[in-house]
Image (cartoon, rainbow, N blue to C red):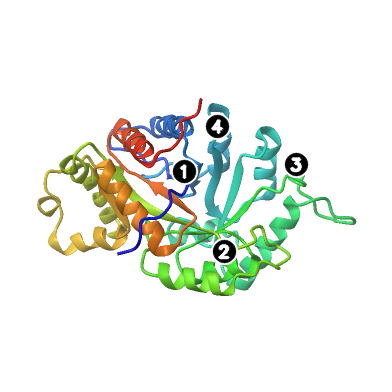
Amino acid sequence: MPTPSRRVPLSVLDLAPRSQGMTPREALQESTKLAQEVDRLGYHRYWMAEHHGSETFMSSATSLLLGHVAQHTSRIRLGSDSPLMVAEYYGTLATLYGDRFDLGLGRAPGTDPMTAAALARSSGQLQDFASEVAALRDFLGMPRAGARVRALPGEGTQVPLWMLGSSTGGAQVAAALGLPFSFASHFAPDQIREALLVYRDRFRADAETAQVDRPTVMAGVNVLVAPTQEEADHLFTTAQLMAIRIRSGQPAPLDPPVASLEDAVPAQLLGLAAAHQAVRAVGTPELVTELLEEFVAEHELDELIITTYAYDPELRRRSFRLLAEAWGLAPAG
């Protein structure tokens, strides 16, 4: 068994989930409350994942939402786990709110193929994507003599870039460009070992685009913390039902927890949740802390990004409070 790790920073990934009976406005209000809570609790980052055309998640216009969140928080770093976005958006946010923003760059648009085609922001090919990331770095960098295309505002803000990925493709781009790498193990756990090996073996600190001097990895984990194991398991059925709905093509607002997942879902669909959420830590604060430490040690991580779903938004916030206390985060003064 891996040796327990040091306590790395904890961050939060939010998709503005909507529970049954909740309006989109209420879902966004609850995400703002969560951002305020994790800001106060001492979490390092609050990222929103861009997701389109979904009745489950309200986080499609992430740059707008992060601007709103910035107005209601004071310390936490804010960022978007999203496809390539216009430099002016994040340059404007950095101009308004200072050095609190990260820009996460991924090839996947977070939606179905038809919506992805409508967005049509990138070919998705590795070489094209790497070139676009390098160009974005230039737009956000210091002014260039003779540049004919400029991001204003944005130029000179040097918003930190993160490469996102759920396979070896993103790992290759992150390594070649010398960028920190965030692996989506919370929903795509199968290739984490191979992807991190590729990233670390091929990392180029001497790349012109390099933003870190060594391989730097953050990975996602599905988490739900409650005072007892029984309650945590019960509440986590909401996330399991969500995964089953998404994987079986039946997305909907979050379901309330159920007494028995086996009784609520056809047997042939039960495996969808296990595959989707294999990287998870569900239970008491003590157990979840132990599981997260083992995960950090196993993959030599620099940071964890936590995603939590609960039908009741207050119980989601409670989960983050219990984890923050158990992990030893320092609440904001």
Whole-Å distance between the Cαs marked 1 and 2? 29 Å
The answer to which of marks 3 and 1 sits earlier in the sequence is 1
Q: Disc 2 to disc 3, how far (Cα)?
A: 30 Å
Give whichever of discs 1 and 4 has the lower sequence position. Answer: 1
Query: Upstream in the sequence, badge 2 or badge 3?
Result: 3
Q: Quadrant of the N terminus?
A: bottom left
Amino acid, disc 2: Pro
What is the crowding at mark 4: few (fewer than 14 residues within 10 Å), some, or many (at least 20)? few
Q: Which of the 4 quarters of the picture holds residue 37?
A: top left
Q: Which residue is mark 4?
A: 68
In x, y percent, where is residue 107? 54, 62
Q: Is residue 119 left or right of residue 53?
A: right
Which residue is under mark 1? 59
Confirm or deny contact between disc 3 and disc 1 (CB under 8 A): no
Badge 3 density bin: few <14, some 14–19, many ≥20, Cα 10 Å: some
Residue type indicated by callout 1: Ser
Are dots 1 and 4 in contact, CB under 8 Å? no
Q: Earlier in the sequence, mark 4 or mark 2?
A: 4
The mark that comes first in sequence, 4 or 3, is 4
Question: Residue at position x 75%, y 57% from top?
Answer: 138
Q: Nearer the viewer, mark 4 or mark 2?
A: 2
Secondary element at image label 4:
helix
- Residue reaching furthest to the front: 3
Residue drawn at (53%, 43%), measured in percent from left and top?
62
What is the x, y in percent for residue 2? Answer: 34, 63
Q: Is residue 59 above or below residue 333?
A: below
Give, as a three-letter code, the residue at label 4: His
Disc on res. 215: 2
Residue highlighted by disc 3: 153
